[in-house]
Amino acid sequence: MASHTQFGSLRQYQKGGVEAINDDPRNYAFANIFEVAGKAEKWERVAVARNLKYVIEVVKAEGTSPWYACAHDEAALVMDGEVGIRLVKPDTVIVAEEHKGATLLEGDPRGRAMGHIKARRGHMALLPKGSAYQFHAEGTAVMLIQTIAGDLTVERWGEICQK
Amino acid sequence: MTEKTDMHVNEAGYRTFKLGNYIFIRDEYFVHIKWPNGSHTLPADRFLKALMRDVAWNFFYGIVNFDEVFGTANHYGTVNVFAGSFNVGYRSNGKDYTETFESAPARAIFEAILEDWTNEGFDPFAAPTETGSAFGPKRGSNTVAVKRQRVSARRMAGVADDTPLRGDANGYLVNRQFADVVQDEPEIHAEQGFEGEVHAFNLFAYLSRSDVTWNPSVCSVVKDSLFCPTTEEYMLPVIHGNDRVEWFIQLSDEIHWQIADRDTGAARARVVMKAGDVAAMPADIRHQGMSPKRSMLLVWENADPALPELYASKKLKPNPIDF
């Protein structure tokens, strides 16, 4: 029998849930990334998982993003659609080494072009430490970002999680 | 402290092993474990599947319950091998038993058991329909299967000098249940001098080529934040007891989780996760998953070595988010 792998998307996803027996469902912070992305503003970085200082952010990608920079590695996993990523090595250090999470840059960074990536569903890209990056999506796409909570991390657990 | 009594071969052809005061015996169907004040029996396939994970994961994070009675609790350098310590019936009647070992020699004994008791054709990491039988008298061995190295990327899979990607060329074929997973690769255009920094890969294709189940493997790293995706089919062969919070993101298909209290085993919840769902596993629970079809699960771990003590001393709450 032919296999059928079920992935989710903004247009089509099913949601499971917590069936409490002797517990509070809020302990599991249960959410769905496509539901969160569907209600997010484009380029908002909404935390859907937090483990102390570390987070996984959901991003709804649409059009061209601002430029970001980060002092540590991050990783972007495309969960729906197609995303272009431009990378630049800034001429000067623009984010302090100890700064955590992504920083929003004003305007375009000055520096050497490092290259660009076109990523589709299931593709994971390295956002290397010390670089500046910009996303672009022709349609609407959804990404997960593995990073550290920072200035741009949006937390709205009461709105996104099962109660 | 530890020794193996590997000279004795029973009538089924299997060696008997000793770890401290524990004695491990297997026959054609079952594994029998004896300790000073008790004994326990569990099916050989269940024992070997759990033992395989315990060895491959170097006792993993927290508690690896082989079943409701026997298991290991990792203290990262030492390991508690327990019987009944996380079972309220045993513990409340003083029938539980725990012995602490240095991790390396204990793991060496477990590896020797695994190698001797795994028959030719049986792969403890494989889905039930993809492997032969664990049962019967001893017949050959499956050293290649039981000595797989766990994937552990230092930065990201596929980066130069990091863990390699999977493909036909290095023997990782697309699994039968992921035959429809798109195998395209991202388009990467690196300027000269940045070839090692501009990197991307097809994680879903990478997972579709996994030859093991229920084996989280590190694929991307942000300091202590580890993305450990894994492919799951049938049932997690251990009941994992947490010593920290971990998170699950269901990348494809679905898994049904049974959640119980870590220390007593009392049922707490059932969590059904479908593609795109995300859920925390609190630091005070045990969990076991069932995947009706082979699925892709992203296990997200925080490897900060200070965490077990912070949760055990209740300096950190077991749930990750208050809202």
Image (cartoon, coloured by chain):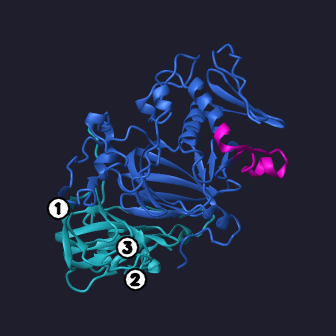
- Report if the CB atoms under discs 2 and 3 are less than 8 Å apart: no
Q: Colour of chain B?
A: blue
Residue under numbered circle 2: A151
Query: Earlier along the polypeptide chain: callout 2 or callout 3?
Result: 3
Residue B92 higher or lower than A139, as above or below: above
User: Same chain for the residues at labels 2 and 3, yes or no?
Assistant: yes
Q: Amino acid at mark 2?
A: Asp
The chain ID associated with circle 2 is A
Residue under numbered circle 3: A71
**What x and y, as percent, mark residue B25?**
70, 26
Q: Nearer the viewer, residue A105 or B228?
A: A105
Q: Secondary structure at mark 2?
A: loop
Could you tell me which quadrant the N terminus of chain A lies in?
top left
Left-right relation of A136 to B31: left
Q: Which residues are magenta?
A: B79-106
What separation in Å lies between label 1 and label 2 (alpha carbons)? 30 Å
What separation in Å lies between label 2 and label 3 (alpha carbons)? 13 Å
Left-right relation of B109 to B232: right
Q: Mark 1, residues whose alpha carbon is within 10 Å: few (<14), some, or many (≥20)? A: some
Q: Select label 2 or label 3 by which is in front.
A: 3
- Magenta-span inclusion, residue B90: yes
* Chain shown in cyan: A
What separation in Å lies between label 1 and label 3 (alpha carbons)? 21 Å
Residue under numbered circle 1: B191
Q: Amino acid at mark 3?
A: Ala
Residue A129 visible to an observer of this rendering: yes
Residue at position x 22%, y 46% from top?
B183
The chain ID associated with circle 1 is B
- Magenta-span inclusion, residue B61: no
